[in-house]
Amino acid sequence: MNETRNNKVLTRALGLPECVTITAGAVIGVGLFTVGSSQVGVLGGSIIIATIIAFLLVLWPSAIYGEMGAALPLAGGTYAYAKRAINYPVAVFCSWNYTIAQIGIGGSEALAFANYFQRLLEALGLPNNIDPRILAGALFVLFVFINYRGIAIAGKWQDAFMFFFWGASLVWFATVIREMDFTNFSYVFAGIPAEITAFAKCVLMVWWCFAGFETVVGMGAEVKFPHITIPRALTISPFIVFGVNALFQWFLLGITPPEALAGLATADAPFAFSMEAAGLVGIPLVILCLGITFGGDFSTMNPCVTGPARYMYVMANDGSMPKAFGKLHPKFNSPYISILTVGVVGIALIATGSIAVLAAMCAFCQMTCYIIGYISYLMLQKKEPNLHRPYKVPFGTFGAYFSIAAYAILALLALDMSALPYNLGFNVICILYYFAFVRKRPIPQESVDLELLTLQTVEPTAEEKTALDKQYLRWKYGGYIVFVVSLCMFIVGFLL
């Protein structure tokens, strides 16, 4: 059975550390260091309110995806759930939106890398006149190559990128903390705009710093002991992501001169802009740019190639994308055609050169996918009440209804008219594609059999379970500590 399985399905190689770093890495990057941090220039100290709202908007959903991922550890995540719970057309529509959103995030991340990398070159006294799109495109090619070589290699690199980012962040925090000025920490609600739509747009951009929390379920077929690992990773990660976001926001508020605060709202690289305005150049700026470019950006780029390639792989097996996308590499066992295609589309999006438009477009696509995901969760409960659910979300039904309403309201309030034509055009193409090429094609029996084969998971031995539990406790308490420390630092900032 194992030989047959290895020849037909993806390899289960991801443990809890990789799942946490993939989840956190998919989130911590372009949002925090571009459009997310720019909201500090709009909200001032009230940025913590928007961050708490964004955290609450992903806490329940993340656990909901943890329940679905544990019960159905398949490639394709929301696509697989929607196909099973709603219907095939909705699943295809969802997968298209997710795929373009993740590739768009990867493109945005690559452009953010280029902006901060140029600041790094400038700080080192080196020429920095390279077109950002060339740098971004080269970075995308690098991550296509890493993922081409298989999930095990990609997972190891993901751990390395994430730990480098955390290490560089701690060094940077220690370097600039003595420069903190708490002038910008006014009354906690003072910076909230009077117009609800303006505040909603700020929240949406900060929420984008949390979007991607479900990335690991798209790789459910490659997670070891998924019924244990996936829900643990998804209940830990939101606390880690909140802590990292809040800590960087705290430092950004503290080092930005009051007269330069508003300039953050339009800065391409807000942290670099803030440090230059404060005169914090040289070593501190080099450390920051190293951490952002080779840690934060890299850790987001990796899953932005891995995730959409898995969606394309499973859709190809179902017949809704060209069959070639479902091919696995004979040596690396990776969906290499899908990975190469992600690279081509990503470079095309990079050519636009606009992070803001890509962010707004991708945020709307992700909102659409998440709402479909929550509906899938509710319908799975009705259609398959006896489905084995190793992990169950407390008050999951209420949480799903609440999340549907909250995400729909936020998407409408924060609707970006500059990105709307792209979203509408893309969805029209998706619908036309379905009716022209997919509607009359039934899902092949081979794909159904492959899904059943993928769902065959094993239980850990007693020794493995003990090791998994100890590992989980370390990650859980680490996440909680970062969460509490970041909140306390904002409280101190407001009191000083």
Image (cartoon, rainbow, N blue to C red):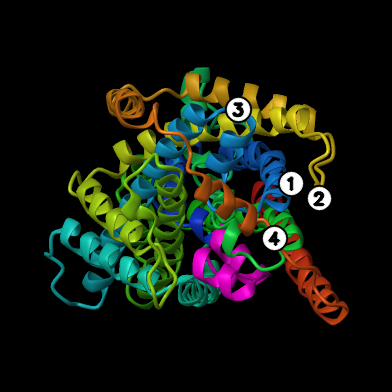
Which is more N-terminal, label 4 or label 2?
Answer: 2
Q: Quadrant of the N terminus?
A: bottom right
Q: Does 16 appear in magenta? A: yes
Which is more N-terminal, label 4 or label 1?
Answer: 1
**Which residue is at a point 39% across and 61% down the rendered structure image?**
301
Q: Position of residue 172 (x, y in %)?
A: 49, 72
- Disc 4 marks a residue whose amino acid type is Gln
Q: Secondary structure at mark 2?
A: loop
**Marking on residue 456:** 4
Residue at image mark 1: 67
Q: Quadrant of residue 244?
A: bottom right
Please tell me how crowded label 1 is: few (under 14), some (14-19), or many (20+) other residues with Cα within 10 Å: many
Q: Position of residue 487 (x, y in %)?
A: 70, 52
- Disc 1 marks a residue whose amino acid type is Glu
Name the dominant secondary structure of the magenta segment: helix
Q: Distance of mark 4 from mark 3, alpha carbons?
A: 23 Å
Q: Secondary structure at mark 1?
A: helix
Which is more N-terminal, label 3 or label 4?
Answer: 3
Q: Distance of mark 2 from mark 4, alpha carbons?
A: 17 Å
Residue 492 horizontal side relative to residue 275, left or right: right
Q: Who is closer to the viewer here, 79 or 364? A: 79
Q: Secondary structure at mark 4?
A: loop
Q: Position of residue 435 (x, y in %)?
A: 34, 23
Residue at image mark 2: 391
Outermost residue to the front: 445
Q: Is residue 111 visible?
A: no
Please tell me how crowded label 3 is: few (under 14), some (14-19), or many (20+) other residues with Cα within 10 Å: some
Comparing marks 4 and 3, which lies closer to the viewer? 4
The magenta region covers 1-24
**Marking on residue 86:** 3
Q: Distance of mark 1 from mark 2, alpha carbons?
A: 5 Å
Q: Who is closer to the viewer here, 31 or 222? A: 222
